[in-house]
Amino acid sequence: MPKIKLPSKQPFIDMTPMVDLFSILLIFFLLTATFRAQEPVPVDTPFSVSEKPTPDFNNMTIVFSSDKKVFFNIDNGPDTLLKFRPKILAEVGKHYNIEFTEEELRKFEKLTTSIGVPIENMKAFLNAETPSERDALQTGIPYDSLNNQLATWVLYARQVNPNVVASLKGDSRTEFPTVRRILDILQDKNVNRFNLVTSLKAVKIEEEEK
């Protein structure tokens, strides 16, 4: 009796659902990802072997360049409803008798880079039409004893967000008096713990010869 030969079929895998899922995930990550903006001035950070990442939220960053300019940045909070940035700007404005409009507060909220603008020039900075006009106003935040605006930013940043943690990002060529002045301002505002932002340095480990 002859054997019954079953027809052989090539397996078929429908990849359409997997491609659709991959596309949805890719679009989701692109829309929700936050990119770190470049600083307004080049900062050559010192090297270290620490791999502790800088926190994305509840973090205020003080940037100081080799030419003694100081910049300030703070995130908007872990929840989009908190909106720390416009609240801080409004409080700093009240301190200097400057009232910002809702549109100016929203513009400040959307900025991601550090700010090095004296508060009296902040309105002109927020309403500037071109990036070159904004860059010209980035002359650094005053932090001398007669006009210590940096201390005011630190004060109201901590009042609006009590969970904020300070991070220092400085150029390795910055002179020590500038660093010391910034540390004194932080200690004066009861900020005794902070992170140092550095560049990761590879360490070569050599095995001992037996």
Image (tube, helix red, strand yellow):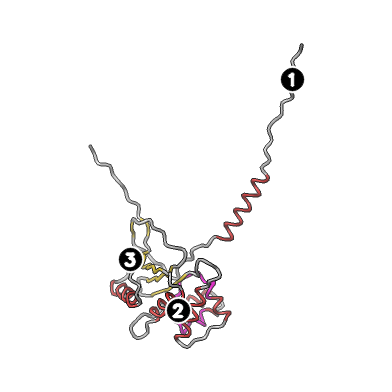
Q: Name the kind of residue labelled 2 in the image.
A: Val
Instruction: Look at the image and give the residue range highlighted in magenta.
Output: 108-125
* Secondary structure of the residue carrying numbered label 1: loop
Q: Name the kind of residue labelled 3 in the image.
A: Ser
Disc 3 target residue: 172
Give the CA separation, mark 2 to mark 3.
23 Å
Q: Quadrant of residue 142?
A: bottom left
Q: Quadrant of residue 59?
A: bottom left
Residue 66 lies, in percent from the top left, at: 35, 71
Give the CA separation, mark 1 to mark 2.
83 Å
Which disc, if any, is residue 5?
Answer: 1
Along the polypeptide, which appears first: circle 2 or circle 3?
2
Front-most of residues 129 and 164 = 164
Q: Is residue 133 magenta?
A: no
Q: Residues within 10 Å of mark 2 (few under 14, many from 20)?
A: many
Q: Residue furthest right?
A: 1
Residue 133 lies, in percent from the top left, at: 51, 78
Residue 117 lies, in percent from the top left, at: 45, 79
